[in-house]
Amino acid sequence: MAQPLVKKDDDRDDEADYSPFLGIEKGAVLQEARVFNDPQLDPRRCSQVITKLLYLLNQGESFTKVEATEVFFAVTKLFQSRDIGLRRMVYMMIKELSPSADEVIIVTSSLMKDMTSKTDMYRANAIRVLCRITDGTLLTQIERYLKQAIVDKNPVVASAALVSGIHLLQTNPEIVKRWSNEVQEAVQSRAALVQFHALALLHQIRQNDRLAVNKLVTSLTRGSVRSPLAQCLLIRYTSQVIRESANNTQTGDRPFYDFLEGCLRHKAEMVIFEAARAITELNGVTSRELTPAITVLQLFLSSSKPVLRFAAVRTLNKVAMTHPMAVTNCNIDMESLISDQNRSIATLAITTLLKTGNESSVDRLMKQITNFMSDIADEFKIVVVEAIRSLCLKFPLKHRSLMNFLSNILREEGGFEYKKAIVDSIVILIRDIPEAKESGLLHLCEFIEDCEFTYLSTQILHFLGIEGPKTSDPSKYIRYIYNRVHLENATVRAGAVSTLAKFGAMVDSLKPRIFVLLRRCVFDNDDEVRDRATLYLNTLGGDGAVVETGEDVKDFLFGSLDIPLVNLENSLKNYEASEEPFDINSVPREVKTQPLAEKKAPGKKPTGLGAPPPGPPSTVDAYEKLLSSIPEFANFGKLFKSSAPVELTEAETEYAVNVVKHIFDGHVVFQYNCTNTIPEQLLENVIVVVDASEAEEFAEVASKPLRSLPYDSPGQTFVAFEKPEGVPAVGKFSNMLRFIVKEVDPSTGEAEDDGVEDEYQLEDLEVVAADYMLKVGVSNFRNAWESMGADFERVDEYGLGPRDSLAEAVNAVINLLGMQPCEGTEVVPNNSRSHTCLLSGVYIGNVKVLVRLQFGLDGPKDVAMKLAVRSEDEVVSDAIHEIVASG
Amino acid sequence: MSRFFSSMDSCPAIKNILILDSEGKRVAVKYYSDEWPTNSSRLAFEKSLFTKSLKSNARNEAEISMFDSNIVIYKFVQDLHFFVTGGDEENELILASMLQGLYDAVALLLRGTVDKREALENLDLILLCIDEIVDQGMILETDANVLAGKVAIQNMDVSAPLSEQTISQALASAREHLTRTLLK
């Protein structure tokens, strides 16, 4: 389409190049601006110069401070002219220059005069300019006029005042809030846009007053709002009210639903769409409520306007994630959209279809998609690949055609991100669908034969090393792997060597042949490749005999590193080269919980390859450093876990204290973080006196007082307890802060010499079972669960009694156990009646624990739970049950 | 400006209005959101937006695309490319009505000849039109006739008395232009 146009341009080349601003230059235009100072103003000429100045600004040219000031003062002269067109340009120019506070004064009086002028156009524009450049002090002077303007009979003036009010509300809320009577009157205006602006401002003024918003919505939904834009706003406000009131009214019909449904019959498309979208986004929407909204969206799908089709298919795509059945009616219309000219619409249609499709339609769908894939951009292709992956997981029987599709597109042209998405998908399918394994591995093998991305090649080689030896005929992969040793760069070659060695270690019958290959690698010209080959040859028993490789050798070479890489990296950074070798056991194993923000990041999908995403640098290191620097605690051994800080004081008290529980094998150290919030006091010899009479198994062994605690600079004091080694002892401790307080002269900051002893009661502290549990995630729960075996499995059922919601119950149990939720199972979908949650962790004594929780709603509120625990030690499995039973 | 965008999530907001030529160069642009704080970030946005939209057929009906989690609606007329950008949660049809209002008003002001040359020669009208359609991100007016009427005032005889009469005359002539373009 663009083609003929370009041609046309060429034909009239010189004409197209013509521009009234050809060769324009800032310096010259600034010179020209001197005409603003002429005693006899030429309005036409002045307008032209302003246009040129605006053109320059629009092209991205900027004025220096001096230039801007000069232009501004010159422009203010133009208020003398009575030319209405010139005045419009002056208004625009002032807004563009955004003058500073001291410059504003120059134009204030002129603008205020215009604001009270008889000409509506002057009034409207002067209001907008004045409100744009004004500050709070001036606002009180003009407030009276603004209030009048809001109810002005000219809609342009009223809108100008209302929109200015919306902006001023951000800077001067207390003033704008005084206008609510006038604004309320304007909501009733007959002019469409005035109504829209007034409604927006009124809602802004009242948005923190839930009752007032509720009243506003109630009255307006009954009346007739004329403007479509205002109606859209009203729909948004109504959904807010519905959202907030949903918690209170559990029974009966949803309030205001009838209003939303009524809006589906509005004559303006934007209102219909707004209402349909609002309905689909209702919390826990039922299929009965959805139906009318889906029906109008379906009509939009066949509209001639791309915007309507896009809006509808985008909304339906979202609905398909939560209510796929509700969208199936639209499938026929969706299928015709696959050939839509607008590729965004086509992609959305395809991914929606993939979500809603049933097993029988998969093959037909794949055929359509194959044609479509060739002419869309990579970013769309990635979306499609991800949708296909989830489809395949949903219908494992269809893995053959879906896997074929993936391998076909893998062979086509594409960028890294796209190829990675495909490879990730294949890897996930191989892991989760056993039948797909062999064909999937072969597809990957073929891919690395001709893969330009080193990262993908090494990742695939690594994956082959894990999965390949377990297949029925491992030998067929060797050729592909060994080819890499010949044809690739050093990184890939090293990866291939490791993979070969893995085959050798796992499959004894292949060992002699693998050794032949490895020996050739010893002559590689890259030292890493040679090193690896030599290492493997020596550790695996280089004589080439068919012997079984020892478990510990395998573990050493190929065992997974069960410490988070981030922690390892931090520890290595802290390690100072010395006689003492680096001890890998000293690396903390705790996984820090991922910040929520990361989970919300769009398009974040579980990655199939590589390590789990690294967590943020942990505070564990900091604690460990701190504790090991205190001689009293130095012989406690390795820190097992540090809890999150627990507050022991209410907010805003004289002294703020929280505590961190450090768990060692045979000891517990409480670290009290104290803050003195009184400027007139200096605390000295601060210590926490702990009464452990309700914690029988604990005995106090050491404490470290805090010498001095000045105002607002936090300090720590420690108390250490001994407890039976390796036993998850629990108990309750009461705490008393004891210190010497000295008065401080606030003016000099000097403390008096004499102090008074004083005490301050803190809240109690408990050591609970969860303190002995490390949050350590596993990347594939099913595999971990299977390999753990059922030897020490303990299963029991519990009634959790009435709960607010299923999610609340799930959270409570997770917190009770202090374990790491796996595979996102801590999130409970809205309205579900049952939920399975997977947890993993390491219990004190380095015992791996996996937990499978099945929750179900029993009656309206009662939650029942089935708890299955697998661990490496039956005592620990029982202990977990005990935690739940006593919690 | 940024405060407007952060606090007004329930109110439709326009992030920018762009009019580019057939090579992606600026004719007139206006940014309301500080998502693009510098001129270079704006130019980069315009360039990639222009390249991405170039292949689409936005001559008869306005087209739409997601772009860096923004919704962009655009329409091409002769050698002019009109764009309106809003957030990704925005009602697409509201943005589309803005674009339609902008385009129709420009067509009225340029008396039906909507191309780059005409637009540059009447740049003051185009800028005034953009000034009247959105105020710091807030939709000010969407009706093309009213928009053109507000801008057209400046074409009136300077000596003529300023009264309601002349404004309605301007409106009438604007309306006449619209009917003419529609009938074409």
Image (cartoon, rainbow, N blue to C red):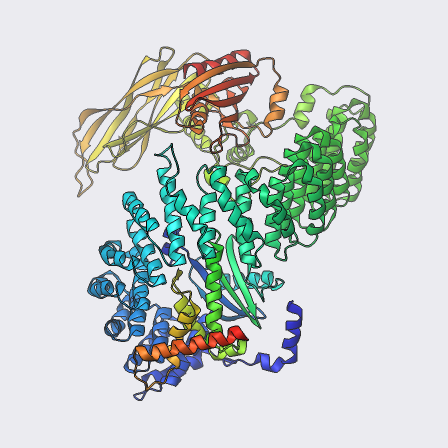
Tell me what residue is drawn at x 62 percent, y 80 percent.
A13
Q: Position of residue A198 (x, y in %)?
A: 31, 58
* Residue A781 in the image: above or below residue A279: above
Q: Does residue A725 appear left or right of residue A93 in this picture?
A: right
Tell me what residue is drawn at x 37 percent, y 13 percent.
A698
Along the viewing direction, whichever of B85 and A235 lies nearer the viewer: A235
Along the viewing direction, whichever of A304 and A608 lies nearer the viewer: A304
Where on the picture, by quarter, is residue A50? Answer: bottom left
- In the rendered image, is residue A517 in sight? yes
Tell me what residue is drawn at x 51 percent, y 56 percent.
B71
* Residue A680 in the image: above or below residue A775: below
Q: Position of residue A100 (x, y in %)?
A: 30, 67
Along the viewing direction, whichever of A659 and A578 lies nearer the viewer: A659
- In the rendered image, is residue A491 in sight? no
Q: Position of residue B126 (x, y in %)?
A: 45, 73
Q: Does residue A158 appear left or right of residue B142 in this picture?
A: left
Q: Position of residue A387 (x, y in %)?
A: 62, 42
Where on the picture, by quarter, is residue A771? Answer: top left
Tell me what residue is drawn at x 32 percent, y 65 percent.
A160
* The N terminus of chain A, quarter of image: bottom right
